[in-house]
Amino acid sequence: MRTRRTGKGGTRAGIVVAAAMCSMGVLLVGSYVSAEQVNRLTIEDLTIETRVAAPEGHPLGSELISGWEFRTPETQVLQQDDFQNPAFLWVEQAEEAWETEEGAAGKSCASCHGDASESMAGVRAQMPKWNAAAGRPMTMEQHINACRTDRMEAEAWKWESDAMLGMTAYLGLQSRGLPVAVQTDGPMADWIARGKELYYSRVGQLDMACANCHEGYYGQYIRADRLSQGHTNGFPTYRLKWQKLGSLHRRFSGCMKQVRAVPYKRGSEEFVALEAYLASRGGGLSVETPAVRQ
């Protein structure tokens, strides 16, 4: 098993966003670091694609760039070495939990899925994934809890619990280096369209949308943090600010709070749709789970 070696907006829109950011004490300075200035991400001889060509007409232009390239060299180094990556404290606990029988059915994850390095390879890259029985796409967290309640007859884990974060990181690790490839057609199309609408909708007292930062100002600074393109390929992520692993939906919630909007709940249809849309925007980038961010 894989473990730690055991389109820019218009001028007027830009002025409005800049003014709103200034009201938050935001400083927008600097420019994006060129490809020649960044180190490539390699972990244990595995090369992670942090830059891929964008399909024609992509709103981010000609290139998709992982959030890893927007971090400081000190933060990048943490992700480049599994021994230094603090997320592996959770990963190692989850590796043990994978083999642990739990619930009335007396089953473990391994009882059905066997070796995670084989059965879970590529799974994270496809999330959220359409579930015909549920009639909706399900995130990794929702698939895990469905297994726990329906197959193991165990209690569901809370979304932001250490157990859930560790397991999503552990399963994501089995797809590390594989390209994000979420389904975009069929029944997923409507959900991705809904997520796109949310991505471009202005919310909160600051009247801002996701796109205002991650499409209109990526590569520039908000205080000490450089804005990324907002891709999801590294989640769950260890953030130095949090001092622990955190889910993608926690990050969504934090962004909404920063623009003074009331966040949707983790696991809500809104956040699942937004996750699906962002995964479709980042198609081709390598899964980095568990990533390290500031």
Image: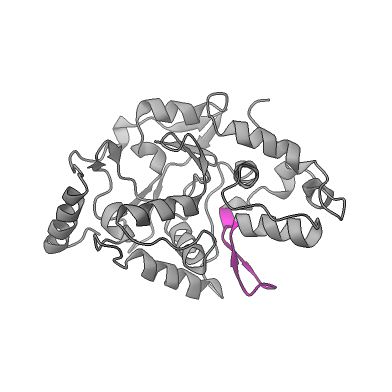
182 left or right of 164 in image? left
Residue 33's image quarter? top left
266 left or right of 135 in image? left
Residue 30's image quarter? top left
Is residue 258 at all visible to an observer of this figure? yes
Residue 17: x, y in percent? 19, 57
Residue at 66% from the left image edge and 52% from the top image edge: 157
Relative depth, front residue between 198 and 1: 198
Query: How many numbered callouts?
Result: 0
Residue 151's image quarter? bottom right
Relative depth, front residue between 81 and 149: 149
Residue 182: x, y in percent? 54, 60
Residue 105: x, y in percent? 87, 55
Residue at 44% from the left image edge and 58% from the top image edge: 278
State how the image is colored: one colour
Residue range of the region highlighted in magenta in the rendering: 125-139
Residue at 86% from the left image edge and 55% from the top image edge: 104
Say which quadrant the N terminus sits in: top right
70 left or right of 28 in image? right
Is residue 2 at all visible to an observer of this figure? no
73 left or right of 109 in image? left
Relative depth, front residue between 89 and 111: 89
| Residue 62 versus residue 200 in the image, above or below | above
Residue at 66% from the left image edge and 47% from the top image edge: 121
Residue 80: x, y in percent? 49, 28
Say which quadrant the C terminus sits in: top left
The answer to whether residue 67 is magenta is no
